[in-house]
Image: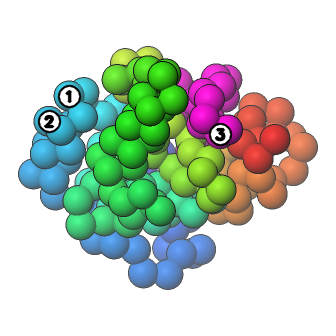
Amino acid sequence: MNSELIGRLCSQIENTHGDLPAPASIKSIHAAEQELCVALPSLLRECLLQVGNGRFGPGYGLIGVEGGYESDYGNLVDTYKRIRDDKKSMGDDWPSQVVPFCEWGGNIFSCVDCTTERVWTFSDFSLRDAGITLERFLIEWLAANGESLLNCDRRHQANVVNPAT
């Protein structure tokens, strides 16, 4: 299923996005996983390795690893560390297997649980289960013809938590 979805992503992005960062190297993926102490979900790895090192997807796009698209906090590892450290400073723990992978702006991120591939929304310094998997998250974005998931019709919104609310 991943190869079919990756192919659809590549086609969609060709039609809707300008220049993307070059795909990530396997070396940069391994370095990120080593720093995070968790393996990224295979679908996220394939997106970064085959489609581009971030900047595509809903909102401001997927966050890349070293050398790729950066959120306001930096690359994937930097963003994870910044959110984790902010939560610690407030006396809260951040789940070690949950990695922010897509930025919406306004300190709102879609995060993936690397052990279950469930997507979570981080906003207002808390995590909420978005009720979808990473695969469904990307399929919903494709179904919205590359639009932000916040702008798709009601049929698609049923499965996607609007992170701005």
Quarter of the image with the C terminus in it? top right
Location of residue 82 in the rendering, given as x and y in whole percent from the top left corner: 39, 45
Quarter of the image with the N terminus in it? top left
Q: Amino acid at mark 3?
A: Ser
Badge 2: residue crowd in 10 Å (few <14, some 14–19, many ≥20): few
- CA distance for labels 1 and 3: 24 Å
Sequence-first disc among 1 and 3:
1
**Residue depicted at 14% across the width and 36% down the height:** 34
Instruction: Please give the residue where the numbered disc 2 appears in the rendered image.
Output: 34
Q: Which mark is residue 123?
A: 3
Sequence-first disc among 3 and 2:
2
Q: Which residues are magenta?
A: 117-138
Relative placement, left or right, of 45 versus 79 is: left
Relative placement, left or right, of 33 versus 129 is: left
User: In the image as oriented, which residue stretches furthest toward the bottom?
Assistant: 18
By secondary structure, the bulk of the magenta-drawn segment is best described as strand
- Give the vertical position of 108 relative to 53 (above or below): above
Q: Amino acid at mark 2?
A: Gln
